[in-house]
Structure formats: structure tokens, C-alpha cells
């Protein structure tokens, strides 16, 4: 039988890794500034661009979507070809993804500092950037699905399932929460009003935390065994972990709206589903 | 409170999609072997060291 040869492309993960560190430093410095502004108001510099109200969303967006986002992409572009024994499906899409995401980050920082905001926490970016995020996310998705479909390893390692779950869920949350009516180039109003806006906002907003954790769970199932050079203690448990998480995580948002105008049963349901997140790993052990 | 319906339907869509994926993965025999996959990921060290070249037969 002929020996097949192929190579892993480390260039894209390297680019994402550099971006991760760079945006990490920028985002955390913005956080330090915002924190000091709380104690020393003089640090607002009496300038509209450097007031706490604008620095804080720059900090949160930079850390979540620039720092953590690029870290996720680094890990996905590094581990996926190795887990599926095939290069990424399209090098062009990888590059579009990389540069598109960095452009979005720059545009986000610039518009936030200039005072353009939807005022929805973790979803402050105005509608043109929301559309750009959707497009780049689709590029990422096509590249990921293409790689999975052309894989040369039959078994889908559990990390791949976490990546898939994250991609689909983030896409849906971003699109539903970002429904807005544009009134000008950089101003829009949310499609939803009052408590309805609050619910969809926290349905999305809680899952901004999902963005921070879920892909990282998948990454831990790859990088931790690799670093320790021994398999995960129980692979069976990691599979149960994914399948229990994917069916209950998404509706945890209402626990951000306790004792508000949200109907009490919805508050209780959201809280129950949040508590179940603790229970399901325990249930898997028993 | 139409938003409750929207978020519920969106959540159920995801759940439905992954239910189908779960059934596929079980029927495909993805979980028949829970020993080889976690061990297999450890064996690509040679591939990364030799100038990013990987071989498999």
C-alpha cells in the first residue's frame, strides 16, 4: 500500500496565537485602566474617548472576543487537523477568517471609543459589525465542517464535538440577539423592547460565558492529555459531559433576571436549568 | 412575551439538531470503542517534529 503524505499547517495557528497574546495585553490593560478609573476619577482624563463608560466595553469585548476568541481559533486550527488527520479544508478561508476577525476587533475598538454602542452588554457593537461577525463566523463554520467531512479518521474525538456545539450555538445566539432596526450607518434600535429585550439579551449574554468556557472544555480534552502524555482519565465521562451539556446549557440566561419583570416561571426554569449544569456531571458519575 | 417563544424555538432547534447528531453518532458506532480514541491522539509526536511532515499508511 502506498504511503500517503500530508503536512500540518502551523502558520495559521501561529498567527492566531500572536493575535491572542497581543489582544490579551491590550484588553487587560484596558481593564486595568477601567479599574483604576473607579478609584481615581482623574484617570478619565476629562476626555469623552477615555471615560469609564467607553473603556469598560472595550475591555470586555477585547478580552472575550479578541483574546479568548483568538485563543479558541488558535486551538481549533492547531488541534483539528491533528485529530482528523487532514489539513484544514481551505487555506484561503483560514486566512479570510484570521484577517476578518482582526479587522472586526479593530473596528469594534474604534467604534466603541467613538461612542457607538447598542448598549447591550457584550453585544455593544453596532449593526454593520454584527453583520461582519456573522459572515466571518460562517467562513469559520464552512472551513470547520469541510475539514470534518473530508476527515481521514473515522472517530470524531470529543473535542471536535465541543467545537461544533460552540459554533452552532454562538451563531444562533448572535443572530437572534442582534436583530435590530438600523436608523443610520452606525445607529440601530433593538428589535425587542423592555423585558423581552432583557431576556434575549441575557439568553445571549450568559452564553458569552459559554463562549469563554465551552470551546475551552474541548481544548482541555485535547491539550491536557497531550501535555500530560497520557489519555484522559475517563473518555466515556467526557462523552457524557458533552451530550449532557449541549442539551441544557443554552437556557441558563434567566438567572441573570431574578426578581425582575420576567415571568416567575421563566426565572425558575432558567435557574433550574442552571442548577442542572452542576448536577449532570454528578449524575454521569453515579 | 413572544421572545419566550423565540428563544424556546431556537433552543429546541439546537437540541433537535444535536439529538439527530447523537443518534447518528451512536448508530455509526462512534462510541463502540472508548479505549483507542483517547490513546490515539497521543501518537502524532513524530509528525510534528519532523518538519511538520506527517505520514500514515
Image (cartoon, grey):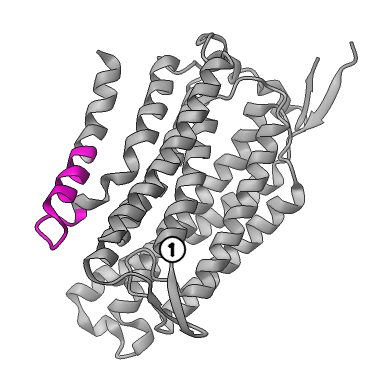
Q: Residue furthest right?
A: A2
Q: Is residue A272 located in the magenta-colored stretch of the structure? A: yes
Q: Is residue A84 left or right of residue A65?
A: right
Q: Is residue A14 located in the magenta-colored stretch of the structure? A: no
Q: Is residue A219 visible?
A: no
State the SS at label 1.
helix
Q: Is residue B21 left or right of residue B47?
A: left
Q: Is residue A6 above or below residue A170?
A: above
Q: Which residue is mark 1?
A: A62
Q: Residue at x 19, y 36 (%)?
A: A275
Q: Residue at x 43, y 84 (%)?
A: A114
Q: Which one is in front, A53 or A179?
A: A179
Q: Residue at x 33, y 74 (%)?
A: A119
Q: Residue at x 44, y 41 (%)?
A: B14
Q: Which one is in front, A257 or A121?
A: A257
Q: Is residue A72 above or below residue B29?
A: below
The chain holding disc 1 is: A
Q: Position of residue B9 (x, y in %)?
A: 38, 48
Q: Is residue A152 left or right of residue A45?
A: right
Question: Which quadrant is home to the N terminus of chain A?
Answer: top right
Magenta stretch: helix, strand or loop mostly? helix
Magenta residues? A256-273
Q: Residue furthest left?
A: A259
* The image quarter in which residue A148 lies: top right
* The image quarter in which residue A214 lies: top left
Q: Position of residue B7 (x, y in %)?
A: 34, 52
Amino acid at each position: 500500500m502506498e504511503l500517503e503524505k500530508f503536512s500540518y499547517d502551523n502558520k495559521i495557528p501561529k498567527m492566531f496565537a500572536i493575535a491572542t497574546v497581543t489582544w490579551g495585553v491590550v484588553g487587560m490593560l484596558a481593564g486595568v485602566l477601567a479599574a483604576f478609573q473607579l478609584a481615581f476619577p482623574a484617570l478619565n482624563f476629562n476626555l469623552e474617548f477615555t471615560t469609564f463608560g467607553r473603556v469598560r466595553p472595550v475591555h470586555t469585548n477585547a478580552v472575550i472576543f479578541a483574546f479568548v476568541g483568538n485563543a479558541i481559533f488558535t486551538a481549533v486550527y492547531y488541534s483539528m487537523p491533528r485529530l482528523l488527520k487532514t489539513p484544514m479544508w481551505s487555506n484561503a478561508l483560514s486566512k479570510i477568517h484570521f484577517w476578518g476577525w482582526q479587522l472586526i476587533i479593530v473596528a469594534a475598538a474604534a467604534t466603541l471609543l467613538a461612542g457607538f454602542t447598542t448598549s447591550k452588554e457584550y453585544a455593544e457593537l453596532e449593526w454593520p459589525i454584527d453583520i461582519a461577525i456573522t459572515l466571518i463566523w460562517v467562513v469559520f463554520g464552512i472551513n470547520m465542517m469541510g475539514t470534518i467531512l473530508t476527515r481521514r479518521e473515522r472517530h470524531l474525538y470529543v473535542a471536535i464535538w465541543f467545537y461544533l456545539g460552540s459554533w452552532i450555538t454562538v451563531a444562533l445566539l448572535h443572530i437572534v440577539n442582534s436583530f435590530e432596526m438600523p436608523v443610520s450607518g452606525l445607529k440601530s434600535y433593538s428589535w425587542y423592547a423592555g423585558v423581552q429585550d432583557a431576556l434575549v439579551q441575557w439568553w445571549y449574554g450568559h452564553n458569552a460565558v459559554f463562549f469563554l468556557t465551552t470551546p475551552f472544555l474541548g481544548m482541555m480534552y485535547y491539550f491536557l492529555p497531550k501535555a500530560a502524555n497520557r489519555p484522559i482519565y475517563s473518555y466515556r465521562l467526557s462523552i457524557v459531559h458533552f451530550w449532557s451539556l449541549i442539551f441544557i446549557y443554552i437556557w441558563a440566561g434567566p438567572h441573570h433576571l431574578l426578581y425582575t419583570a420576567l415571568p416567575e416561571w421563566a426565572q425558575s426554569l432558567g435557574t433550574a436549568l442552571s442548577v442542572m449544569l452542576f448536577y449532570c456531571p454528578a449524575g454521569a458519575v453515579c | 412575551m413572544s421572545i419566550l417563544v423565540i428563544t424556546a424555538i431556537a433552543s429546541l432547534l439546537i437540541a433537535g439538531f444535536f439529538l439527530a447528531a447523537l443518534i447518528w453518532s451512536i448508530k455509526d458506532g462512534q462510541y463502540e470503542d472508548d479505549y483507542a480514541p483517547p490513546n490515539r491522539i497521543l501518537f502524532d509526536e513524530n509528525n510534528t517534529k519532523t518538519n511538520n511532515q506527517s505520514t500514515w499508511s
